[in-house]
Amino acid sequence: MQTFLQRNLFSTNFAFRLIMKKTHILILVLIAAAVGYMIMSMGSLSTYESIASAKQKQGKFVNVIAKLDKSQPVEYDALKNPNYLSFTAVDSLGNTAKVIYHSPKPPELEHTERVVLKGKMQGDVFECQNILLKCPSKYKDDPKNVQKSLNENTQQ
Amino acid sequence: MQYIGERLLPGQLGHLFVILSLVASLVAAIAYFKSTQSDLPEDKESWKRLARIAFSLDIISVFAIFFLLIFLIQSHYFEYFYVYKNSSTELEPKYILSCLWSASEGSFLLWTLWHAVLGGVLMFKGKEWEAPVMTVISFAQFCLATMLLGIYFFGKKVGASPFALFRQQMPELPLFASDDYVTKIKDGNGLNPLLQNYWMVIHPPVLFLGFASTIVPFAYGIAGLWTKKFGEVMKAALPWALFSAAVLGLGIMMGAAWAYESLTFGGYWAWDPVENASLVPWLVLVCGIHTLLAYRSTGHSLRATHLFFILQFILILYSTFLTRSGILGDSSVHSFADLGMNIQLLLFVLVFLIPALILFAGRYKQIPNIVKEESISSREFWLFVGSLVLFLSAVYIISFTSLPVFNNVTDKKSALGEDQEYTYNRVMVLVTSILGLLTAITQYLKYKNTNRDFILKKIGVPTVISLIISVLISIFGGIHYDKYGAGYLAAIHVALFAAVYSVVANAMYIWVGMKGDIKKAGASVAHFGFGLVLVGILISSSKKEVISFNTSGIAVPFGEDSKENSKENLTLVRGQELSMLNYKVNYRKDTFFTGDPKRYFEINFQDKEKGEEFNLYPNAFINYKGNTGLMANPDSKHYWNKDIFTYITSLPDPEKNKDTANFHDKTVKIGEKIFFASGYMTVDTVTSAYERTRINTKAADSVVALKISVIGKDSSNHLAQPLLVYTKGNSVSIPDTVLSQDLSVRLNAITTDGINIGVKESDSLLQYVTLKAYVFPMINILWIGIIVMVIGFLMSMWRRFKNV
């Protein structure tokens, strides 16, 4: 054992092997930097929340998947203020929250199956920064929608 | 039931050709495989002959499928579900092809069609590598043919056929209870309005040619590993890789141009998962091209090249999985329905990934490798470093794009943070700096070793010139993008220098290094273009400016966090002028064109200082074909140094604006001031002459007209001319409206007491649009850069093809 160590650890050959090619060093450094950067970036990731859990995370940027609550009014008047929309969202657990969005009303809002709301809960109000709409009209393979489109395109 | 009037023959032919292409491509794959494996030359030849016949059959079948589907769409055979779903009778002829590739089945068809074309070329040009390369391509053709099958296999649906009949697809619909249903379907569902755009005609074929062509460098990589003639094979792959990079790059940026010009994303690139998924394979392909160049001249980096060529194709397959599995549903503005083919799509990735990686791992030690390391002053060293940086940036982008996939696997629920674009931009600004410098300097280095004096002598001038230019831009260019602080702004300026350096150094290299020999200058031209792309991106994104800040309406106190998207939209009332940065804007009128279902809004812009005037026509589909609401297309005014860009974000809701106000009658005298909510009016004269469009009083016995001056609060002056028309003893009052003042006036009667008029004020008279407008400076540098870069790639490709 001792001879092995003596022969190898202290020989220039082994030392040379420890000092890798500079290409390898560069690869390692770059990859380490990239991985480090990614781990750092993970910290700025957000999460998907329900309305209830979003209320627990006040002021934190989250994604909420919900639906428009059609029993509540949608407030938007482009003449008064084109950058103010408010409506009520209801999630699959039945919780509701008032949503405020400082942009025009997405044209298909009333007809969407579900919305992905990106923003922050401030008290009981969800300050929305971005809305993704998932419209049924785009899922043409759903028989219900096909029937709807058929009603327009057929003659009985 | 016996159905009447169905035209089943084309569909049956279609099914037949799908199955033929499936079988033919499988036979071709096996025969090419046997040809590669055989030791005896005569065996090789006979297998190859069989394979060629089989692949030719595949080419014929694929083209037959393509033309049959075009025929179905063109003939409006709505008994076919694909035709019903994606087309309609009123569609302009140029969109027939768009219908074909607007849905998943058609785009798979387009992909397999390009594979067939490329395979056809390779049968002639592949020479000694034909058999192994075509084995891979034939197998890919087989996989793509399964996507078009649409049959059930052990209870699992395999593929989706474009020839499926409507009644088979949805037998539960009541329509199919009647045997003459075919005559009842009068029209199709139509092409998604967002896709009714000329970009939809040209972007998909180019993008899919790019997609399809990436299999060629991959197949060469596999062929090299398989036949153990690693380097020799790879050298033959170079022109193909360059072709692929040119076309895929062009395809991606055509998508960007489409997004910029015709969609309301407010830009050309949003780091949307769909965009990323196609960018990343391109980046990795470019890595492979650069390491391959290093290998050609020095023997270094062959292993990396093999790996890059494998990965770029796998990433293409992965992007197909991402965009078609519905997994991106919650993270992309593009909506992709789940096709119900997820397992098949995943298998499509794995069936290439696993064998390729096993082969690569097994042969790794045998791939020639030079142990002696590259000199730090050599070109190959920096080519490798550049590729590595590019590759790591690709890894970074695809990792964050794949978050929904990780969520699915790990049951976690994470998403990109508050600013999705910044997640990518902050890394890419660093990558830009490094790549800009490397593309500027590396061409000046020689392979193996470069003399220090040589470098300093040659690169001194371009360095000084670029420093001067970029400092001038930094000082006078007005780049003050401080949303993310001084550090990020500094990074932008550094990146700008690197990008300018890349442009200048590569332009000068054509003369300094190449002595003006333009034939050899493909690389310099491509890098020159790439540099322009970087400059264009940096300037246009950091100086992009919203000009439609809201100056009307009630100011709402916005929270600090929402400052970014607040007040960026402006409501324009028709006929009422508003101020927008240095423009006066005015919404004038709506226009329609025959054969075009869109409504065009004429928005007049007038430069306050120069007085220059122009009209923009942002337009929208409104309640089109069951698509409720508004689908807007922007319009832009192009200058050499900037674009003014605007689109409609909201329109009045007709439901809410039912006219509820009434006329209030009063008797007045000429010259008397009559006040209303936002001004006053006076009746100037009573006359029989009037000037009103669209009113025909030729049949009338007599007409009484009033000339009323309406003065708004803003001291604007309008003329209202209500009429009273007498025909055969009856009188009809025709009111006149002043839209900008929400005012309608009618003439009831002229009596001895005075003139009896009715005045109505209501919101519903108002016609208005809400819009958003941007200025994009220097966007043309980006577009020119793309074109130059593609030309550079093609120049290199042409030269390498001749050398092979």
Image (cartoon, rainbow, N blue to C red):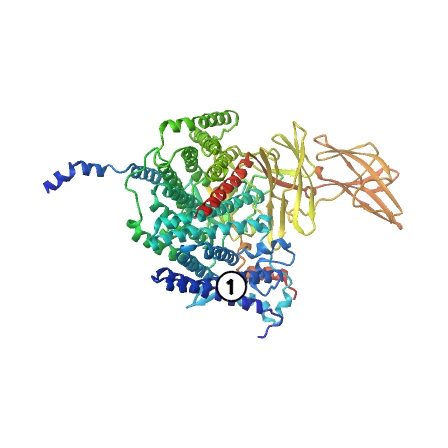
What x and y, as percent, mark residue B510?
48, 34
Q: Residue A44 vs residue B149: left or right?
A: left
Label 1 marks which chain's residue? B
Q: Position of residue B39 (x, y in %)?
A: 33, 61
Above or below, B44 relative to B738: below
Camera-side residue of B798 and B604: B798
Badge count: 1
Please give the residue where the numbered disc 1 appears in the rendered image.
Answer: B61
> Measuring 82% from the left and 31% from the top, which residue is drawn there?
B671
Residue A69 percent across, percent down from the top left: 52, 50
Q: Amino acid at mark 1?
A: Ser
Q: In the displayed image of the protein, which residue is found farthest to the left?
A: A2
Depth check, front residue: B568 or B453: B453
Q: Quadrant of residue B152?
A: bottom left
Residue B45 figure quarter: bottom left
Residue B179 percent location from the top left of the image: 61, 72
| Residue B15 in sight | yes
Secondary structure of the residue carrying tag 1 is helix
Q: Quadrant of the N terminus of chain B?
A: bottom right
Does the image show residue B547? no
Query: Around disc 1, counting alpha carbons within 10 Å, would you say few (fewer than 14), some (14 to 19), or many (20 or more)?
Result: many
